[in-house]
Amino acid sequence: MIIGSHVSYNAKEGLLGSVKEALSYGANTFMFYTGAPQNTRRNPIDLETTKQAFLEMNKNGIDKNNVIVHAPYIINLANKEKEEFSVDFLKQEIKRVEELGFDKLVLHPGSHVNQGTDVGIKQIIKALNQVITKDQKVVILLETMAGKGSECGKTLEEIKQIIDGIKYQDKIGVCLDTCHLHDAGYDMSNFDTVLTKFDKIIGLDKLQCIHINDSKNDINTHKDRHENIGFGKIGFDNLLKIIYHDKLKNVPKILETPYIGLDDNSKERLFPPYKFEIEMIKNKKWDDSLYQKIRNYYK
């Protein structure tokens, strides 16, 4: 099982800090942003700490081919008004991913900003074809979206439509998000049917990452609110079947579940749940005392 979570990446330790954090959770992969997802500020990549990070990865069995980088949220390829900025910044991110030595970059397709889904998808295709080159090593993984607001990519058909428009097909893939699929109307309790539909429409060879998240919402509500594993509307057993699915054993699974406060009213000092969620997944047994365990651990 290839499983990890979102981890931090900061100026002080860079990639080495990300690897240390992933290992502290008992993970054998991880996902990170190369800088804050909400802005353009980026620190130069420290080659020495990056080299140390790869030594730690090799020593602890983390395959670089399973590590995921996430593109920043401020990139919106579906909005024509932000085309120049989004294209230029995504090109910079791809260069950073390559400099760091990785080859998978998850990207939110974008929001059409009330211009209509078809217009948004055409704009995404246009922008991606400006970004993607035949020589780049990085594969862009389009993330399935919940359909919140004017998001494109809320159905498998929309994702397929984007992929079909890309010139260099080997440089494009898909990242499934379980919360997003559920919120978009796909039944995670019948995941075999969803996976069969995915294979028929897109092809399983394009599936290169899965975000494992429970959902706070009922199915088909298009709200995109992640929940901790087993505490939401998808449920632990359904998520476990996805994680351990035979057809997905070589696909990296990444947790993006909410941080937990030291009490129910905490809005500050939130702590990652990943160490304990990964333990539950490995033990194949849901622990309803998850929140208390996290609080006791970080007190």
Image (tube, helix red, strand yellow):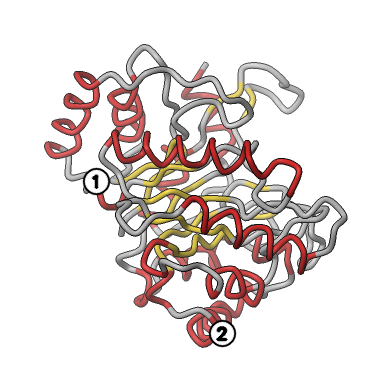
Q: Residue at x 48, y 83 (%)?
A: 199
Q: CA distance from mark 1 to mark 2?
A: 30 Å
- Residue 242 got which mark? none
Residue 230, by quadrant, is: bottom right
Above or below, 4 relative to 221: above
Query: Position of 248 compared to 164: left or right?
Result: left
Q: Which residue is mark 1?
A: 64
Residue placed at 36% from the left, 12% from the top? 12
Q: Name which residue type carries label 2.
A: Lys
Q: Secondary structure at mark 2?
A: helix
Question: Dot 1, crowdedness within 10 Å: few (<14), some or many (≥20)?
Answer: some
Q: Is residue 262 left or right of residue 4?
A: right
Give 68 or 288, whichever is nearer the viewer: 68
Q: Is residue 104 above or below residue 203?
A: above
Where is residue 187 shown, x and y percent of the image? 67, 75
Q: What's the residue at 22%, 22% (across, down)?
A: 47
Q: Residue 197 bears which disc, if any?
A: 2
Question: Which badge, 1 or 2, is on the more N-terminal residue?
Answer: 1
Compared with 28, 55 (above or below) is: above
Q: Say which of 150 and 227 sits in front.
A: 150
Q: How many marks?
A: 2
Q: Are marks 1 and 2 in contact (CB under 8 Å)?
A: no
Residue 179 picture location, percent across and down: 64, 58
Residue 75, position as x, y percentages in the image:
62, 41
Within 10 Å of disc 2 (Cα), the crowding (few <14, some 14-19, many 20+) is: some
Local secondary structure at mark 1:
helix
Q: Amino acid at mark 1?
A: Lys
Q: Residue furthest top?
A: 12
**Quarter occupied by residue 235:** bottom right
- Figure quadrant of residue 41: top right
Left or right of 112 in this view: 140: left
